[in-house]
Image (cartoon, rainbow, N blue to C red):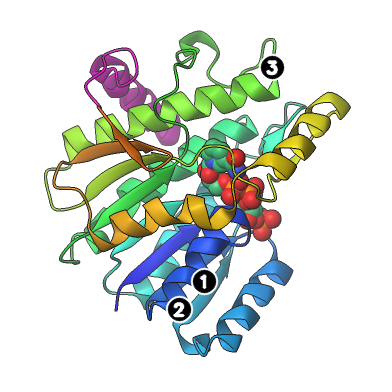
Amino acid sequence: MKTVVITGGNDGIGRGLALTRLERGDKVVVIGRSEEKGKGLLAAAEERGAGDRAFFIAADLSLVAENRRVLDEIKASFPVVDALVLCARFFRSDRFQTADGYENTFALEYLSRYLLSHGLTETLEKSEAPVIVNVAGPGIQKPGIRWQDLQSERGYNGVGAQMQAGTANDLLGVAYAAEHTGRTRYVLINPGSTATSIAGQYDAMTKAHVDALKRMGKPVAQAVAPIDAVIDAPPVEPLSAYVEGERIRVDHPALFDKDAAARLATVTEELLAR
Ligand SMILES: NC(=O)c1ccc[n+]([C@@H]2O[C@H](COP(=O)([O-])OP(=O)(O)OC[C@H]3O[C@@H](n4cnc5c(N)ncnc54)[C@H](OP(=O)(O)O)[C@@H]3O)[C@@H](O)[C@H]2O)c1
């Protein structure tokens, strides 16, 4: 029986994975904001006879202190974690600044993943085959990091913020694999367009696009399968990446830039030390 921690497990791919792993006999810890959706997930677990193996932690992962509280709660309750799956996301057409002073997409979709990946490593290392699965957008040529404007204070747009978070997660994988030489494998997964809740605050034009995506995206089960597979059998290499189930190379200097990865890790530590 594995212990699988899933952020954003209240909806979409994270929820699909949570129910799949519960049906498989695992312990699953879901993290999301909505208590109501969390109760729904626990009820779905109960219906599957897995109520005693399903756990929900309510937290706003866009806040640094909430990530630290979640880490403390997980470490206090689960001596070993086999898989950490990072799925929490929230699109914003309008720039939103968190109480910590970070742009929301940066905070939720990158900083939280940085904190949880590094913060849970000791607990993951107690597993025989530990893996972190960062579900984001590897394999797509994206704009680089806006080093002079990391918090998108100038000329914010929602898609640009998502793209920067995607790049930051690719670099997080590169830096994590270079820093941690233990057993934990880092896997970047791009599920491709999938019909999920695609949670967000949208302007009219973006909403029309998202509605079309919800109609035309692949079923959640298809996006879940490759994540499920790497939890069962993590790759041998410290870092790997997949696009819609196909493994891609991680030595492309433009997509997985080692210097930029090291620079982002340093900048992130400086931000967190403020
Ligand atoms: N769907 C696609 O087409 C697609 C394509 C490429 C990549 N991906 C990636 O796949 C992953 C899963 O995407 P999805 O489409 O399945 O997601 P989704 O259906 O939009 O669900 C996102 C989840 O994030 C949670 N969340 C939002 N804000 C949060 C916060 N501040 N703190 C904690 N949790 C928060 C939401 O739960 P609450 O409402 O309870 O907070 C929700 O359960 C994401 O990383 C996404 O970038 C998806």
Query: Magenta segment range?
Result: 250-274
Q: Is residue 121 above or below residue 245?
A: below
The label on residue 23 is 2
Estimate how packed mark 1 is, as few (under 14), some (14 to 19) or many (20 or more) residues with alpha carbons within 10 Å. many
For badge 2, the amino acid type reads Glu
Secondary element at image label 3: loop
Sequence-first disc among 3 and 1:
1
Secondary element at image label 1: helix
Q: Residue shown at 38%/51% (left/top)? A: 226
For badge 1, the amino acid type reads Leu
Question: Given this view, does label 2 or label 3 mark the residue nearer the observer?
Answer: 2
Residue position for label 1? 19
Estimate how packed mark 3 is, as few (under 14), some (14 to 19) or many (20 or more) residues with alpha carbons within 10 Å. some
Query: Does any portion of residue 121 appear in the rendered image?
Result: yes
Residue position for label 3? 156
Q: Nearer the viewer, residue 157 or 60?
A: 157
